[in-house]
Amino acid sequence: MKGRAMAAEMSQQPAVLERLVQRRAAIAAEVRQAVPRPLCGTTLVARGSSDNAALYGRYVLEMAARRPAGLSAPSIHTLYRSPVDMDGYLAVAISQSGMTPEVGTVLRRLREQGARTVAIVNGTGSPLAEEAEVTIHLDAGAEVAVPATKTFTATLLALGLIAPALGEVAWSDAEIVALPGQVAGLLSDRAPAERLAARIEDGERVLVTGRGMLLAAALETALKIRETTGILAEGISPADLWHGPIAAVGPGFPVLSFLSGEADDPDASELTDTLRRRGARVQVISSEPGADCPLPAGVPPGLLPILAVIRGQQVAAALARRRGLDPDAPAGLSKVTLTR
Amino acid sequence: MKGRAMAAEMSQQPAVLERLVQRRAAIAAEVRQAVPRPLCGTTLVARGSSDNAALYGRYVLEMAARRPAGLSAPSIHTLYRSPVDMDGYLAVAISQSGMTPEVGTVLRRLREQGARTVAIVNGTGSPLAEEAEVTIHLDAGAEVAVPATKTFTATLLALGLIAPALGEVAWSDAEIVALPGQVAGLLSDRAPAERLAARIEDGERVLVTGRGMLLAAALETALKIRETTGILAEGISPADLWHGPIAAVGPGFPVLSFLSGEADDPDASELTDTLRRRGARVQVISSEPGADCPLPAGVPPGLLPILAVIRGQQVAAALARRRGLDPDAPAGLSKVTLTR
């Protein structure tokens, strides 16, 4: 069966996330010991799919620490070999495989220059783990399908579980505990994503929008669609869509729109209206009533991206099935990025 | 004449850059007074086209300061309204129009929370200037064409001229002084970009690659092509291209590749070879002999992106002309991003 591995790995997500949730106190305690005081800032080191996780991490870590967080520029260390004083910084490296050589190289350079270091990896024996003072094993099991699913959502949750080590988070313990069950609920409700995929399956381009933390979900969903179907899907913030690519949006153009459903984001509905006036096939993924693809209501903004990513996985897998493609092994892709 | 404004504004770039170069000592001195000591880091605030300039800025400012630099996440301040202690940070805001409301709002929030602030604007009376302790006026004159050209390269140069206020830069005074003349040389040599455009004009998708600081040039070139032609052009780092979108690259697929021409980037030629084996129409923009579109030789990596952007502008304008479009006023685009 085409897509068997991806489907199996998607279905394991509630159990993987549940195991991480149960380790939440230990993870926060271990990372807390590595956080420099006073903290200048946090830097995230990632490549490819993990870059989308890092974008989520930069929000939750900056908002918890109340000190700036950002993504490292690997080229500064690997291409230009420029020295950077990392005193006062926490560096968090992410590599689902733990094998992307550049991520390990950058983390080592950051540590040598004074950063305290944390690595998020899946599986033991990861070379990346050797470069970090603290290692968080995702314990997600082997991932065989090329499109990362369970390791991606596990990485998002791990970043959320690191956040309390830096400061106060904007969700309750009960809300974290409820998350794996909400993921299971979405996974057992496949029809909305199937219907959504049916409405856009003929598109050769797709734009996926999301603001703030939901941009990470939009970028990840676009990547999953590209990986599983070859459709040129592009994740983009609403602000950047306004500024340029909206010119390419005409009648029938498919747009997936992740919306937070918060009343304090007046731009979101304005953008949706404008896109619909241009004739775009806007498909809303949101907890608001009437969404094309629903998310649970009442989830704090800091945890919503994890649920949004599940919907994105379902859409990508459904699009591949409808096009007769095998999402497990798209042409021309390998699992590990080998950039030095 | 279609594209008259864009052509005129492109031709003004040597004079605009020359005026900035002459102000280099004053700019560095003024910014130096605003830099917190000790410096925790630098954060850049931008949207849309200016975001591509900010990406260049994060490299030159981090490499000069030898302290991390990164791009701010405006949503943290405008959507989530989350407090962030900015003590020890220099914030540099960029808005070519000075009118993007969100950039001003974020800069004010950063200053209120302890950041020292610099604004890069074009024209006087910019609301953004009121939010900053130090304002650098680009003095580029009015920009009428929707695709920003002279204000973009002026912004890159302004960021390069700020860098010495933070530490040691990797170029000489003579190399900065030579830059406007090199820009004039490229602008008077239009044939290579015309030939390149002729080879890819039928493409409905274009990938534009660049590593390290040249990623800023790749993203900006992709944006210019989208703005002037509606072609779905996507800027991407070689590492991220390897990881995913390469699956969509088949025979005839146009790829513009900005290469630094440095021997210490072994991945670049490997990627070019792989793309060519897949049948892609790879067009190299580089200072290496044999490039499809040449850049001057011997330019330091920190200044090369400014010249690379000129080539990208020429390609975007030529593509629009060949398709009978007016690059000055693409359908559906306005000059100012009004995201709150």
Image: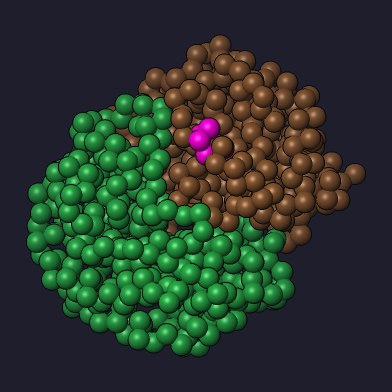
Chain colours: A brown, B green
Whether residue A14 is visible to the viewer of this picture, yes or no, is no
Q: How many marks?
A: 0
With respect to residue A123, does A260 lie above or below?
above
Instruction: Return the residue found at the far right.
Output: A1
When asked about the image quadrant of residue B278, the answer is: bottom right
- In the rendered structure, the answer to whether residue A116 lies left or right of residue A237 reads left
- The main secondary structure of the magenta stretch is helix
Q: Nearer the viewer, residue A107 or B93?
A: B93
Instruction: Return the residue found at the far top.
Output: A174
Q: Nearer the viewer, residue B253 or A43?
A: B253
- In the rendered structure, the answer to whether residue A212 lies left or right of residue B39 reads right
Instruction: Return the residue found at the far front.
Output: B1
Q: Quadrant of the N terminus of chain B?
A: bottom left
Q: Residue at x 22, y 44 (%)?
A: B127
Q: Quadrant of the C terminus of chain B?
A: top left
- Write down the region rendered in magenta: A268-272
When asked about the image quadrant of residue B145, the answer is: bottom left
Whether residue B278 is visible to the viewer of this picture, yes or no, is yes
Q: Residue at x 9, y 57 (%)?
A: B29
Q: Where residue A2 appears, x then y in whole percent?
A: 86, 46
Q: Residue at x 53, y 46 (%)?
A: A236
